[in-house]
Image (cartoon, grey):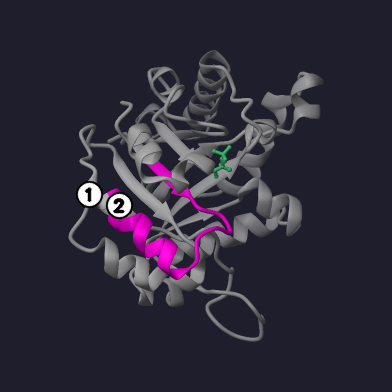
Amino acid sequence: MRKNIVAGNWKMNNDLSETLSLISEIKQIQNTSGAECMVAPTFINLQSAFETAKGSNIEVVAQNMHFAQNGAYTGEISASMLKSVGVRTVILGHSERREYFHEDDALLKQKVDFALENNMRVIFCFGEKWEDRSADNHFNVVESQIKNALFHLSAESWNSIVLAYEPVWAIGTGQTASPEQAQDMHAFIRGLVEKQYDSSISEDVSILYGGSVKPNNAQEIFGKNDVDGGLIGGAALNAESFMAIVNAF
Ligand code: 13P
């Protein structure tokens, strides 16, 4: 069943006390839309965030993960470590990971496989840069990002995949994609999944939009047929604006 999901990607923001206050504030605001609500604090605060979110319907998720279970990978975090503090979902492939940490499709494919082997759910991010869109190459770029990292997966694995289309030019810029641009890309993505698998999988997968989603534009974007929610950066750092987006369905 396709679900409506709103996930707050906090990126490298919020220390421990800020993390706990923000989760407590979010908990106090009623989720009237029934959308799944997730927050992704930094690694070091995941456990405390998980404890604070207990008893609410806020899921605490991770922003990244390594592709091995343990070993000589200084500074990295594995699936078993995440699971040991209660995390069941991980964001992979964010454009900031691709850009600043040189994560490519081959590495992301390994990470996706590893997350699924560990029974974790993956929010897989992808999206074109402005130069791709201005060259009218955005559909090709997105197609190859998805194909290279996900199209080797079995049909059953898709139960654990959430897609997140985040055009790089819309992230943190205030220049959101228009609802039509988001819808066109989401419909294209759903079509790709249908062609590779079948319509039951393509109809079931949730496709989130990310890139300057705010309380004042969320309703219009989420109103599009193939947009099943959002991955929210800046506006997720404030409880009122985040919950206004969660409640925009
Ligand atoms: P903004 O909402 O700040 O544009 O960030 C989007 C994003 O990158 C979420 O992962």
Q: Is residue 12 left or right of residue 158?
A: right
User: Is residue 52 shown left or right of residue 13?
Assistant: left
Residues in magenta, as a range: 6-26
SS of the residue under disc 1:
helix
Identified at 37% across, 73% down, the residue is 47
**Residue bearing the label numbered 1:** 28
Quadrant of the frame with the N terminus: top left
> Which SS class for mark 2?
helix
Q: Tell me: residue 219, above or below residue 125.
A: above
The answer to whether residue 40 of the structure is visible from this angle is: yes
Q: Is residue 7 magenta?
A: yes
Q: Is residue 22 magenta?
A: yes
Across and down, in percent, residue 98 comes to 70, 51
Quarter of image, ligand 1: top right
Residue under the image location 63 percent in, 38 percent down: 172
Is residue 238 left or right of 130 when viewed as pictured? left
Q: Where is residue 51 shown, x and y percent of the image?
A: 28, 70
Q: In the rendered structure, are the residues bearing label 2 and label 1 in contact, judged by CB atoms less than 8 Å apart?
A: yes
| Residues packed near mark 1 inside 10 Å, few (<14), some (14 to 19) or many (20 plus) | few
Real-space Cα distance between discs 2 and 1?
5 Å
